């Protein structure tokens, strides 16, 4: 099993303003990818989901793409 992206890079906080990192975990339709596909641990997946929601609310990420 591979190590979590955030644990591997020693990131304790998933920043909602760091859009480039958040985009890695979204599919082409701007939906969040599952833990199985990304390899993120459960704790950081929850933080990631919250960060994506905040970034969408602030207008940094789209809710959907066409």
Image: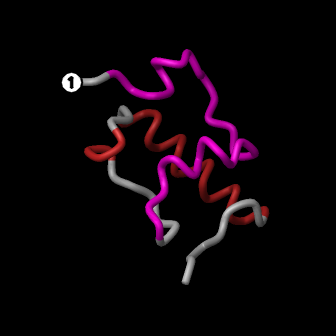
Q: Residue furthest bottom?
A: 66
Mark 1 neighbour density, 10 Å: few (under 14) some (14–19) many (20 or more)? few
Tell me the SS state at disc 1: loop
- Name the spot of residue 22 as percent of width and height, x first: 59, 47
Does 27 sit above or below residue 62? Answer: above
- Name the spot of residue 47 as percent of width and height, x first: 54, 40
In the displayed structure, does residue 47 sit left or right of residue 42?
Answer: right
Q: Which quadrant of the figure contains the N terminus?
A: top left
Q: Tell me the residue at 68%/56% (across/down).
A: 54
- Name the spot of residue 59 as percent of width and height, x first: 77, 66
Does 40 sit above or below residue 50? Answer: above
In the displayed structure, does residue 40 sit left or right of residue 52?
Answer: left
From the viewer's side, name the closer residue of 58 and 39: 39
Q: Is residue 7 magenta?
A: yes
Q: Residue furthest left?
A: 1
Q: Tell me the residue at 69%/38% (across/down).
A: 15
Q: Tell how many labels.
A: 1
Q: Is residue 23 magenta?
A: yes
Give the magenta part as a residue range: 3-28
| Majority secondary structure in the magenta region | loop
Residue where numbered disc 1 is placed: 1
Question: Which of the 4 image quarters holds residue 38?
Answer: top left
Q: Please name the colour scheme applied to the rendered image.
A: secondary structure
Q: Tell me the residue at 68%/63% (across/down).
A: 61
- Name the spot of residue 45 as percent of width and height, x first: 44, 41
Q: Which quadrant of the figure contains the C terminus?
A: bottom right
Q: Tell me the residue at 47%/44% (across/down).
A: 46
From the viewer's side, name the closer residue of 25 and 50: 25
């Amino acid at each position: 099993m591979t190590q979590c992206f955030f644990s591997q890079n020693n990131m304790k906080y998933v920043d909602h303003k760091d859009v480039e990192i958040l985009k890695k975990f979204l599919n082409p339709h701007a939906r969040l990818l599952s833990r199985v596909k990304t390899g993120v641990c459960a704790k950081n997946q929850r933080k990631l989901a919250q960060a994506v929601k905040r970034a969408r609310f602030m207008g940094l990420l789209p809710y959907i793409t066409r």
